Amino acid sequence: MKHKTNPVFPEGFLWGASSAAWQVEGATLEGGRSQAIIDLNSQTKKPYADNSIAADHYHHYKEDVALMKECGFTSYRFSFSWSRIIPQADRKVNEEGLAFYDNLINELLKNGITPIVTLYHYDMPCWVDEKYGGWHDRKIIDEFDYYCRVCFKHFGDRVKYWLSINEQNMQICYGHWLGVSKGCKDWFKEKWDINHIMNLCHAKAVIACHELVKDGKIGPVPGYVPIYPLTGKPEDQIAAMNAEELTQKVWDDLYVNREYSTFIKNYWKENDIHPDIKEGDMDLIKEAKIDFIAVNCYRSDVAKAPDPSFTQEIGLNKSGIKGDFTYPNLPGEYAMARNPYVEVTDWDWHIDPVSMRYALRYLWDHYHLPMVITEFGYGAHEDLDENGKIHDDYRIDYLREYIYNIGLAIEDGVEVFGINPWSFTDLLSTGNGMAKRYGLVFVNTTDDDVRDLKRYKKDSFDWYSKLIKSNGQEWGKDMKVWRDFENKSKEE
Ligand code: BGP
């Protein structure tokens, strides 16, 4: 649809940024917190960088919130660390852990910033892993329910927006990378058991939130990567649909329709997969009616018909050197490829602002639920220049064009109530530590040298601040985005 004017963002639109506990807090063994599996990963090997300090938000939270206020934020999306709140298997609640989040939440509210809290963002407590083998044992469902209930009861008077599990789909699709496959003999099959247990944990969180938080709203956080067919070949379209199903739609359908789709049931049958779905499980899932979808969307992918003669698993770019990415080829399912029409980051992520409009339209058409954007952002190699500045024009371009496309989606009729780009301060990247920075605020630390952890506003901070304070009217220099097909063809 063509829109003659710049988009108008609704009154009360939430403008903020995003983070996750293990990537930003540091202080992993302070304040009564016990270790999480992801801490151990980060300490032993790169590309995980040591998260015991990270951006040291634990000690800088007041300064960080003051900067958010200065930027004009009206929301902040962050996560609780399960092992900070319940550090041991005895289920004793850690008062110091609650106090840290109380202080953070109170500081946000005092500054007019709405907290949006993720309950689980990749940081499985070691005690849960030791006792139950992570997500393998159904007993984790009760532990997770207990943890969520502690959070809802304690913080529910002040936190009204809750997110269940961050990127469950990515945890299953990239199980080896994110450590979820640990202990599995046959990941191809067992991942569907683990996924089912995660679905039940998600359902428990949704039900408990509605029971315990007055006016509380809760949603899942799918990692959404729009997938286009590489060409107009019909086979490429089916491949794109297969990729869509097997990397995200299966999850989104479950959250919204609260039943497994016929696609995944047939896929299981075809592959002799029998997830352990017990009596009563689907009733629980049916009860878990979500209020919104929180969308993480950084990039797009393209799919093509796979070559039946070989199998190639996806190989993520871990070096930050362009081209160091292996596209998967999965016979019977799909293959993926480089999209020749868009640029890529140093980590080979397609930079595709229009895909954000596509994603929002797609999700709205399929699910008719309000959405909040909880992650999108530009990862880059960065350091201070001789004047102590970061001139991150590439990030401004990325944010401007992505946000503009969110505006276009709103004009197209999609309901979006806020955006929270990744990330506010620099923090540890999941794949590349501090070597891949996303922040609007530079944190003076590297993977090899802790430095002084001082905060420096990047140029993108000032740009975003102006946009927020004008409720999405001041876009800065001329936009590269195209508003309609007419402008696009004029450009070419
Ligand atoms: C999302 C995760 C975040 C974050 C982001 C960027 O999938 O929810 O935790 O890390 O991706 O990814 P990376 O840090 O690997 O660049």
Image: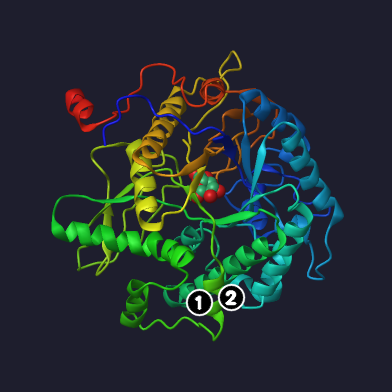
Determine the residue located farthest toward the top in the rendered image. 387
- Give the SS element for disc 2: helix
Q: Which residue is mark 2?
A: 136
- Give the SS element for disc 1: helix
Residue 81, percent from left and from top: 70, 54
Kindly indicate the quadrant of the structure image that contains residue 208.
Answer: bottom right
Residue 260, percent from left and from top: 42, 73
**Residue 121 visible somewhere in the drawing:** no
Residue 392, percent from left and from top: 48, 24
Q: Residue at x 72, y 58 (%)?
A: 152
Q: Please, is residue 291 above or below residue 473 in the view? A: below
Q: Nearer the viewer, residue 485 or 323?
A: 485
The residue type indicated by label 1 comes to Asp
Q: Which residue is mark 1?
A: 193
Determine the residue located farthest toward the left in the rendered image. 233
Looking at the figure, which quarter contains the N terminus? top left
